[in-house]
Image: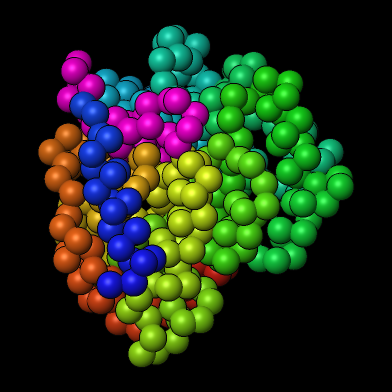
Amino acid sequence: MSTTRRDFLLSLAAAAAITEVDAQTGMPMRLLGSTGQKVSLLAFGAGSRWLAYKDRDKGLEALDRALKAGINYIDSAASYGNGLSEQWVGEYLKTHKKDFFLVTKIGGNRTYDDAMKIIEQSLKNLGVSQVDLMHIHALENESDLAKIEAANGQLKAMQKAKEQKMTRFIGVTSHTNPQVLKTLLERHDLDSTQMALNIAQIGNAPPSNRAGQGQTGAAGFEMTAMQAALKKKMGITAMKVFAQEKLLGKASPEILIRYAMSLPIAAATIGMPQLAHIDFNVSVAKNFKPLTPEEMKQLPATVTPQLRAAIDHFFRDHVDC
């Protein structure tokens, strides 16, 4: 067994070992890297799946149901519904105490000025002066990275937001290119990162999208960007565990969720457009048992190179909204 693979399997065991269970709700909790913050193993994705409730009151009912079930990580973004997701969270906070970990994501044209405008609007939408975590939203390719890192780029704005206590922590998300995410994580000291983690081990770079070479995930988020984050003790959250439903049928929803939760992550962020989905996913989390190393190895092998390439192609152009 290679050193990389051995270290990876040890990290899986370590993740399972540090999971605690909240005495009141029964929800498993994990530390978000070195932030010191404990978050629920299941996170509430407040994107298009939440906005699919369409009616605000129904959406708030879903949010309240999730929070009462023990979920304490709420994942929104400035672009979700063009601010509607943040506004719904803000409406909830008008009548409820903020007792959850509030996250939003900032996109835009990657300039300092534009990012600061979006940050200010996001705080206004949410009705708060500070969020717990603010992510750079959806890092894409090398060109995108260059804009973010520029002297007048978004990274400078995120650092300023943290200095000015607009957010407690900062980070970055990506579902597009694991190599580019790895580069950013290695170059900068961030608190958190969110990435696409599923049995397809999304790569968008050789060999993961080459027929016949797609079984190791060597170029995917799991074996590149995630490893860089672990080395820096960053908080890691998973997204796209179903690959926008493209993996449903390749394994059961429970197994797909358990796969992500068996990784050394703090939480798996999932959109839940029906109350029944909340109940099901909460049950999976509360009864969570890590998959065995053999299962973790076998599941990615069930995804054909053709499907893997199709998923990679889809996420290359996919926009969170």
Q: Nearer the viewer, residue 81 or 307?
A: 307
Question: In the picture provided, is 319 more to the left or to the right than 292?
Answer: right
Q: Is residue 264 visible?
A: yes
Provide residue 143's location: percent of width, then percent of height. 74, 65
Q: Residue furthest right?
A: 151
| Foreground pick, 128 / 28 | 28
**Residue 256 picture location, percent across and down:** 24, 57
Total marks placed? 0
Residue that appears at 76% across and 30% down: 160
Where residue 63 sits in the image (x, y, percent)?
Answer: 36, 27
Question: Which residue is drawn at the image coordinates 82% and 41% (left, top)?
Answer: 112
Outermost bottom residue? 212
Decide if residue 248 is on the left or right side of residue 130: left
Q: Could you tell me which residue is drawn at 84 percent across and 38 percent down?
A: 113
Q: Quadrant of the N terminus?
A: bottom left
Is residue 63 shown to the viewer in this render? no
- Which region shows up in magenta? 22-46
Query: Foreground residue, 304 or 84?
Result: 304
Q: Quadrant of residue 182?
A: bottom right
- At a point 52% along the width and 74% down the height, the residue shown is 204
| Relative depth, front residue between 180 and 81 | 180
Left or right: where 173 falls relative to 118: left
Within the image, what quadrant is residue 32 found in? top left
Q: Is residue 226 above or below residue 55?
A: below
Q: Is residue 165 magenta?
A: no
Is residue 215 depicted above or below 29 in this figure?
below
User: In x, y percent, where is residue 305?
Assistant: 35, 83
- Quarter holding residue 39: top left
Identify the colour scheme used: rainbow
